[in-house]
Each structure stands twice: as structure tokens, then as C-alpha cells.
């Protein structure tokens, strides 16, 4: 690998099209990091099975949609490695080994896993594989001896646990793994169009691939300050979702919009029109680039298979070191 500042690994579960929360919360960050780090972008298909094992047949189409979004926003397979988790079988092998040295209480108290279990109402219906979610994620990161893991706030607990597992392995056997650090974005979390957490299951997402009409319609339906009912009523930008979007997608106009909203001169209809236009400015070039891949699933597949092959080399080197450190290099 080239002379860069270090190795980055991040990933997402392929559950379909990505939304603009992914764009500002993660992807823009990933795109920028490609220039100064060796980046691996992981399609975590095995992680999908931890909760969605009965829908495995939907995974290929979901991978296609997600990776089209990755390519459209500017992740570049000429610079970075795109890989499919299940295609590099060392992920499963290292997962098994790390599971052996991970005390059960570490997993049981992992707040991200607990939240996932309660969000999906899985209490009492948990499968063995789901408990292994953070260990598999640790294997993803440590397999490439990554230094940095750019993730959202919700994933920090998993990266923390990865550090603990790395430390434990290095201490028990030999130092093989660097302790990876989480790298957070500064962008605040984008709410959904209804003000709740943006999530596919709540139907409140604006997708990266939405066309102009879809964006307009969704923005029009967004909730604003309930006390601002008609033009002339003063509004409170600090509690308005539309405003929180302006602050991210329409920085140059935020001063003017704050003033117009507070004074009542700017009505919500106009304000939403300006937001839809600003989101359009961000999404237009992305939609253009996406077109080149959307109808070419073979091209996308080729990128993933090539990347997985390249990743396998480094993964095999790590596993050789793991076996040697454990004294199991028969
Ligand atoms: N758990 C991550 C998510 O849901 C996806 C993921 C799997 C991941 N393996 C990873 C993220 C390794 C960073 C590093 O978004």
C-alpha cells in the first residue's frame, strides 16, 4: 500500500438505498479521507443476517443500490478498496478466533447492541449471531490492521470494544493489532422529515437517489414550528427541522433565513422552496454520476469482486500473523 497516513476501514450494512443523513453523516467524510489514507469500504452483508436472516435473497439488490450511492457520491474504486464481507472468508475466521477471547459481559453491556435490540423489539428473540455483532465488527476492522474508523456516534461503542479486543489479543499472544480510533464527523445528526430519527422503517427519509420532484414533495411535508401558522407569524428556527437542514445544505443563506423566520417575513412555504433548491444543488451532480452505474450491475459487481480480491491478500497476511502469534502456525 502507498505512502499514506494509515489505513482506514469503514462499512455499512447493505439494506438498500442510502439517505441524505448517510451523505452528510458519513459519506462526505469518507470521500475526503480517500486522498490521505488507504481506505477500505466494507459491504457488511453478514451483519445484515444478524437481524435479517430470513431476507437473505434481497441482499444482492440492496448491495447494488448501496454501492451505486457510494460511487455516485465520489467514493473511488481506483483509489480505495471496496469489498464484500462474505467474499473475504477471513472475516469469518477472525470473528471466530476473537469470539474465543471476548468475555461475554463485554458483549452484554455494549450500548449500541442493546439499543439495536430494543429498537427492533428483539428482546427474548435474540439469536446467537446477533450477540456476536460487535465481535464480527471488530474482526472487520482488525483484519486490515486499520488505524482509523470513520463512523457515526452510534458506532463508537463498537470501535471501543474493538480496541479492547485488540489490546487483549496483543497482551495474550503477541502484538499484531494496532488499536483503532473512531473518527467522528462534525455534522450534527440530520432528523427525518417528521423530526424523528431518519430511518427507512419510519418512512421519513430523503434518499440520495430521489429526483427533484420527490425532494420537493418530501420537503413540503416537513414539520415546522407549530406556532408559525401563517405568513407574518414569527417562527423559532432552533426547533424547526427545515432550519436544521438549511444549516447543513444551505449555509450561505442561513443568516437571512433565521432573520426572515424570526421576524415572520419569510413564510414556511418559501423557506421550504429554498431548501428543496439547495438540496437539489447538492444532489444534482450525484444523480448524474449515479446514472452511469444504475443500469450496469455487472460493472458494480466487478468493482466489488476486484476489491474483495485485493482485500483478501492483506487479510491473509493478518491471519498468518494471528496464527503465528498464537503458536498455531502448523
Ligand atoms: N455496524 C455498522 C453499521 O451498522 C456497519 C459495520 C460493519 C461497520 N462492520 C463495520 C462499520 C466495521 C465500521 C467498521 O453502520
Image (spheres, helix red, strand yellow):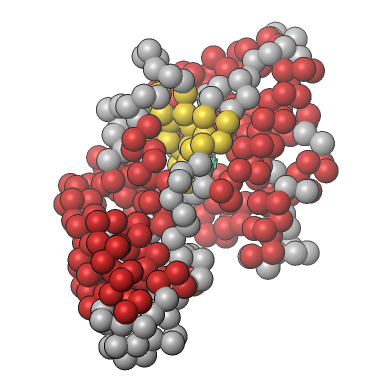
Above or below for 124 versus 320: below
What is the count of numbered marks?
0
Location of residue 164 in the rendering, given as x and y in whole percent from the top left corner: 72, 31
Q: Looking at the image, which residue is at 32% across and 79% down?
A: 263
**View extreme (bottom): residue:** 230
Q: Is residue 108 toward the left or the right of residue 303 in the image?
A: right
Q: Looking at the image, which residue is at 47% across and 23% down?
A: 7
Q: Quadrant of ligand 1?
A: top right
Above or below for 324 versus 289: above
Q: Nearer the viewer, residue 175 or 267?
A: 267
Location of residue 317 in the rendering, given as x and y in whole percent from the top left corner: 54, 14
Location of the N terminus (image quadrant)? top left
Query: Splitting the image into 4 quarters, where does residue 242 fall?
Result: bottom left
Location of residue 194 in the rendering, given as x and y in whole percent from the top left corner: 45, 75
Q: Looking at the image, which residue is at 31% across and 71% down?
A: 259
Q: Nearer the viewer, residue 56 or 80?
A: 80
Q: Nearer the viewer, residue 261 or 299?
A: 261
**Could one spot residue 233 in this view of the protein?**
yes
**Could one spot residue 62 in this view of the protein?**
no
Query: Splitting the image into 4 quarters, where does residue 37 fall?
Result: top left
Q: Is residue 270 toward the left or the right of residue 49 in the image?
A: left
Location of residue 283 in the rendering, given as x and y in whole percent from the top left corner: 24, 56
Location of the C terminus (image quadrant)? top right
Amino acid at each position: 500500500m502507498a505512502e499514506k497516513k494509515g489505513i482506514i476501514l469503514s462499512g455499512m450494512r447493505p439494506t438498500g438505498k442510502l439517505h441524505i443523513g448517510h451523505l452528510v453523516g458519513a459519506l462526505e467524510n469518507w470521500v475526503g479521507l480517500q486522498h490521505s489514507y488507504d481506505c477500505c469500504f466494507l459491504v457488511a452483508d453478514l451483519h445484515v443476517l444478524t437481524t435479517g436472516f430470513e431476507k437473505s435473497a434481497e441482499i444482492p439488490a440492496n448491495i447494488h443500490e448501496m454501492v451505486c450511492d457510494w460511487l455516485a457520491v465520489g467514493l473511488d474504486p481506483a483509489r480505495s478498496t471496496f469489498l464484500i464481507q462474505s467474499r473475504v472468508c477471513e472475516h469469518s475466521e477472525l470473528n471466530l478466533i476473537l469470539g474465543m477471547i471476548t468475555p461475554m459481559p463485554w458483549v452484554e453491556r455494549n450500548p449500541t447492541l442493546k439499543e439495536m435490540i430494543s429498537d427492533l423489539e428483539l428482546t427474548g428473540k435474540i439469536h446467537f449471531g446477533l450477540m456476536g455483532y460487535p465481535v464480527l465488527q471488530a474482526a472487520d476492522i482488525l483484519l486490515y490492521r486499520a488505524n482509523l474508523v470513520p463512523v457515526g456516534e452510534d458506532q463508537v461503542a463498537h470501535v471501543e470494544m474493538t480496541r479492547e479486543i485488540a489490546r487483549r489479543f496483543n497482551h495474550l499472544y503477541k502484538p499484531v493489532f494496532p488499536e483503532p480510533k473512531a473518527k467522528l464527523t462534525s455534522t450534527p445528526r440530520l432528523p427525518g422529515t417528521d423530526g424523528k430519527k431518519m430511518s427507512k422503517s419510519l418512512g421519513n427519509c430523503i434518499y440520495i437517489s430521489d429526483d427533484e420532484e420527490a425532494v420537493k414533495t418530501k420537503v413540503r411535508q416537513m414539520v415546522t414550528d407549530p406556532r408559525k401558522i401563517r405568513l407574518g407569524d414569527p417562527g423559532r428556527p432552533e426547533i424547526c427541522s427545515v432550519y436544521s437542514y438549511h444549516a447543513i445544505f444551505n449555509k450561505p443563506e442561513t443568516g437571512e433565513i433565521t432573520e426572515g423566520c424570526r421576524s415572520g417575513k419569510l413564510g414556511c412555504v418559501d423557506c421550504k422552496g429554498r431548501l428543496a433548491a439547495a438540496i437539489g444543488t447538492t444532489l444534482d451532480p450525484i444523480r448524474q454520476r449515479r446514472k452511469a452505474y444504475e443500469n450496469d450491475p455487472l460493472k458494480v459487481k466487478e468493482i466489488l469482486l476486484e476489491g474483495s480480491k485485493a482485500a483478501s491478500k492483506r487479510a491473509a497476511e493478518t491471519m498468518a500473523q494471528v496464527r503465528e502469534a498464537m503458536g498455531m502456525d502448523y
